[in-house]
Image (cartoon, rainbow, N blue to C red):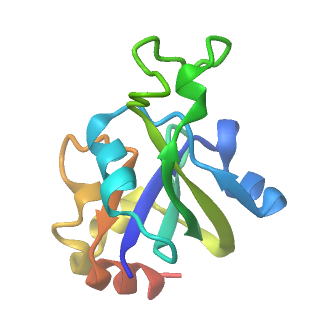
Amino acid sequence: MQYWLMKSEPDTFGIDDLKSRGREHWDGVRNYQARNFMRDQMRKGDKIFFYHSACSEPGIAGIASVVKEAYPDHTAQNPESKYYDPKASADDPRWYMVDVKFEKKLKRLIPLGELKRNPALEGMTLLKKGNRLSIMPVEEAHWQAILAMV
């Protein structure tokens, strides 16, 4: 099993949205490195920290899991979608998504500032200067250290 962190803006799709739906596809990823993580490395059963970004208090809000491995992101081929990519086609989909399932909402949001102050998280990708990826791997030691913060 692998561990991941996936970012979403809570005003667009937050942990409560995933909780109410139970399961959802993770569409709209338009960064090649994040796409490659989903397409090439994410596997059914992998655990995910659900991270609220671009909000007044960014941080880890909950836990989800991968329930369907990567498949073409249909929004890339839909001209009506804000994620439309005219270069994507059925033969060359370019963009992929996975399905995720709600596991739990944390008792409290673990804010980014608190994560930065935890010495056990040194070297975590999320905390590296300039990192803006929406999907990133999480080392098991970092996963366990974050769970201990709840």
**Residue 27 as seen in the image, left or right of residue 1:** right
Q: Position of residue 64 (x, y in %)?
A: 59, 69
In this view of the protein, can residue 124 be seen by the observer?
yes
| Residue 75 in the figure: left or right of residue 95 | right
**Front-most of residues 63 and 22:** 22
Q: Residue placed at 76% from the left, 52% from the top?
A: 17
The answer to whether any part of residue 60 appears in the image is no
Residue 107 sits above or below residue 91 on the image:
below
Q: Quadrant of residue 20?
A: bottom right
4 w.r.t. 142: above or below: above
Compared to residue 44, the image places residue 16 above or below, namely above
In the rendered image, the quadrant that contains the N terminus is bottom left
| Rendered residue at 25%/74% (across/down) | 121
- Identity of the residue drawn at 38% across and 86% down: 144
For the residue pair 104 and 106, the one nearer the viewer reads as: 104
On the image, the x and y values in percent for residue 42 come to 39, 64
Residue 120 % position (x, y)? 24, 81
92 to the left or right of 9: left
Looking at the image, which is closer to me, 138 or 117? 138
Q: How many numbered marks, from 0 up?
A: 0
Q: Where is residue 83 in the image (x, y as percent from the top left)?
A: 54, 22
Q: Is residue 112 above or below residue 53?
A: below
The residue most toward the right is: 20
Name, please, the residue furthest toward the front.
91
Which residue is located at x 66 percent, y 66 percent? 101
